[in-house]
Image (tube, rainbow, N blue to C red):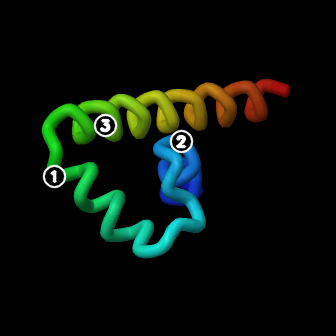
Amino acid sequence: MLYEELTRYFGIAGSYRECEKLEDAWNTPEHRKAIKDYIFAWLEFRRKRREMIAYA
């Protein structure tokens, strides 16, 4: 799920060699920071969503 959302967010979903492109982005410092920020935000969103469902 996270992989699919990452590829969509960075505009490489469905492209040729999307895995390699994501890896190349990870090897670039500014893209690595953007990927990390996205992952942390995604995890936080999922955590809050689980809490909301648990209390519903």
Q: Position of residue 7 (x, y in %)?
A: 50, 54
Does dot 3 land on a helix, a strand or a loop?
A: helix
State whether residue 14 is above or below residue 53: below
State whether residue 32 is above or below residue 7: above
In terms of sequence position, does the residue under pointer 2 or pointer 1 come before the other? Answer: 2
In space, the residues marked 1 and 3 are separated at their CA atoms by 12 Å
Q: Residues within 10 Å of mark 3 (few under 14, many from 20)?
A: few
Q: As drawn, is 19 to the left or to the right of 2?
A: left
* In the foreground, 19 or 16: 16
Q: Position of residue 4 (x, y in %)?
A: 57, 58
Q: From this viewpoint, which residue is outermost toward the bottom?
A: 17
Label 1 belongs to which residue?
27
Q: Residue at x 47, y 73 (%)?
A: 16
Q: Residue at x 23, y 40 (%)?
A: 32
Tell me the amino acid under the disc marked 3: Lys
Q: From this viewpoint, which residue is outermost toward the front?
A: 16
Label 2 belongs to which residue?
9
Q: Residue at x 23, y 58 (%)?
A: 24
Label 3 belongs to which residue?
36
Q: Quadrant of the N terminus?
A: bottom right
Q: As drawn, is 28 to the left or to the right of 53?
A: left
Does dot 2 land on a helix, a strand or a loop?
A: helix
In terms of sequence position, does the residue under pointer 3 or pointer 2 come before the other? Answer: 2
* In the foreground, 40 or 34: 34
Quarter of image, res 53: top right
Does dot 1 land on a helix, a strand or a loop?
A: loop
Tell me the amino acid under the disc marked 2: Tyr
* In the foreground, 34 or 12: 12
